[in-house]
Amino acid sequence: MVDGESLQSLCDKFVQLQKSERTKRAYRCDLRQFLEHLQLTKKGYRSVTRRKRSDLVADLSEFVESFGKYDIHSQHLTNGTTLNRKRFTLVKFFDYLIDIKDFPFNPARKLPVYPAREFSNTPTLSKEQITKLIAQMSADRTKSKAHFRNYLLISTLFHFALRRHELVNLKWSQVLEHPIPHWQVRQKRNRIKYLPLFSKFQNRLDEFVTLHGKPSDYIFTPLKNNRTKDLEKPLSTNAVLLIVQKVAMSYLNGKHVHPHSFRATFICLARDAGIPSKTIMNTTGQKNVQTLDYYDIRSHLEINAVHHMANIFV
């Protein structure tokens, strides 16, 4: 091939080098969009090296910024995190080309880091809302296997502050008894975290097994599968989203929440309770306080040191 190995082939090889399946999916999607946008799907990598550097940087910038969303009034960028993720994918891919193909430079590093939200816009629940939700779902748990599974699913998302992919990969074999009851959770970048199982939750797990057995080593499995009939596989992350939406309609008057809402709610309530950041991070698995702060979306008017000084005023 005059233009050398195809960019599509190089993208595939680059994706396969990643350890995390989540990272593979994200990179694969971003790079597919990139090749399609620049009409490079069937081109070799040398066709890119022949382009003027300024033109290549401009093309990458146009691609990334095509995903931008803007506030209707202020016209400020509202999804800088998305743009930065796509920029990062391109940075890593062109670094890969430099390593294996002596690509002359990394055009993605010329792109700006886009302004991102200082805080997450994830919708959360109040302490009263989450308490009422768990209590109502607990009362309904014996109505059916679906009710019980969904009750455990919501409780697990909240009480252990799990991400969707962490939840669906939980296994009965990861429930361990020593040194204290806990389970082993595989999180982002294949890191392992250990979360204590409190006795009331353990009792509910035992009750579920007594009533419904263990159809699989996975804790959360589908109740029906019209396509393949396989009920031993884990729920998909999309199925978790649909369950959360169904729960919101049934118990929260249709409030807009999604699976990550329970993790964010955990962080906000833990901060309200004055729990140290390190202790919270032992649950969430986050590595720095800045990431924890991102999900602490409590009102700055309510959590403000002014209130603590008010009694000095006369």
Image: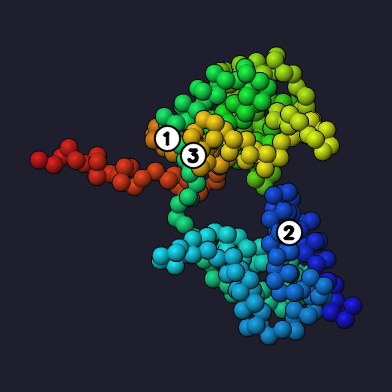
Q: x, y percentage for residue 32? A: 74, 64
What amino acid is found at the position of numbered circle 3 in the picture? Lys
Label 2 belongs to which residue? 28
Sequence-wise, the earlier of marks 2 and 1 is 2
What residue is shown at x 57% (from left), y 63% (from top)?
84
The quadrant the C terminus occupies is top left
Q: Are marks 2 and 1 in contact (CB under 8 Å)?
A: no
Tell me if residue 191 can be seen. Answer: no
Q: How many marks?
A: 3
Tell me the residue at 58%/38% (across/down): 245
Quick check: marks 3 and 1 in contact, CB under 8 Å?
Answer: no
215 shown above or below 50 = above
Q: Is 65 situated left or right of 224 in this image?
A: left
Position of 273 with respect to 287 (left or right) is left
Q: Circles 2 and 3: CB distance less than 8 Å?
A: no
Pointer 1 residue: 126
Please report the residue visible at 79 percent of the width from the left and 70 percent of the height from the top: 41
CA gap, disc 2 and disc 3: 33 Å
Instruction: Using residue 116 as the reference point, say whether residue 174 is left or right of it.
Output: right
The residue beneath circle 3 is 255
Position of 228 relative to 213 (above/below): below
Q: Where is residue 193 in the image (x, y as percent from the top left)?
A: 62, 36
The CA distance from mark 3 to mark 1 is 12 Å
